[in-house]
Image (spheres, rainbow, N blue to C red):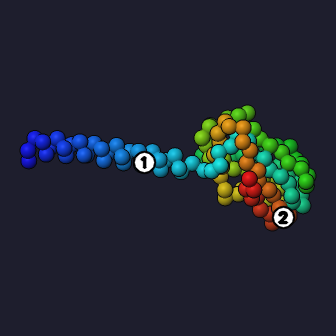
Amino acid sequence: MTFRARLVGAALAGTLAAGASALAGASAASAQAEPCVQRIAVVNNAAFVMSFSVQASNGLETANTDNYPINQSRTIDLTTTALPVGADVRPVVDAVAGATRTPSTFVSYCENGQTATYSVTGTTYDYSVTLIG
């Protein structure tokens, strides 16, 4: 193999490695949950009194809100918590004298002023928590 062929081969290998690295970075970035929000709000549309906390995918969790009845909501501003920016988060809903539920849908924590709103519907042992916006 000539010197020029080795040089072109090395340049091509470097270009391919850089491209693969960029793709890997894009994959890691796209793995973050959408939307990206600063606050989590949970609306109580259920037939019970409830509270909620926010849990990160790594297991860290905030303190619970106060207990609140149907047709009310509470909001947790993630900037007031120990959760790290960029964490995937979701609410953990606790029905008073009932079950605890978490939605399957995570959102990401960003300091951008946006709010993700979840709705709780059902009864103390049979309810769902759904991301609505």
The spot of residue 105 in percent (x, y) is 66, 56
Give above or below for 93 relative to 37.
below
Residue at (83, 45) in percent of width and height:
74
Find numbered disc 2 in the image and state the secondary structure of the residue it sits on: strand
Residue at (47, 47) in percent of width and height:
26
Name the residue tied to disc 1: 24
The spot of residue 94 in percent (x, y) is 80, 53
Kindly report which numbered mark, 1 or 2, lies closer to the viewer in this rendering. 1
The spot of residue 76 in percent (x, y) is 77, 41
Which residue type carries mark 2? Gly
Name the residue tied to disc 2: 122
Q: Nearer the viewer, residue 71 or 19?
A: 19
Residue at (73, 56) in percent of width and height:
131
Which residue type carries mark 1? Ala
Residue neighbourhood size for the residue with mark 2, other residues' Cα within 10 Å, grouped as few (<14), some (14–19), many (≥20): some
Q: Mark 1 to mark 2: distance in Å?
A: 42 Å
Q: Nearer the viewer, residue 66 or 6?
A: 6
Judge from the rendering whether residue 32 lies leftward or rightward of residue 51; answer left or right.
Answer: left
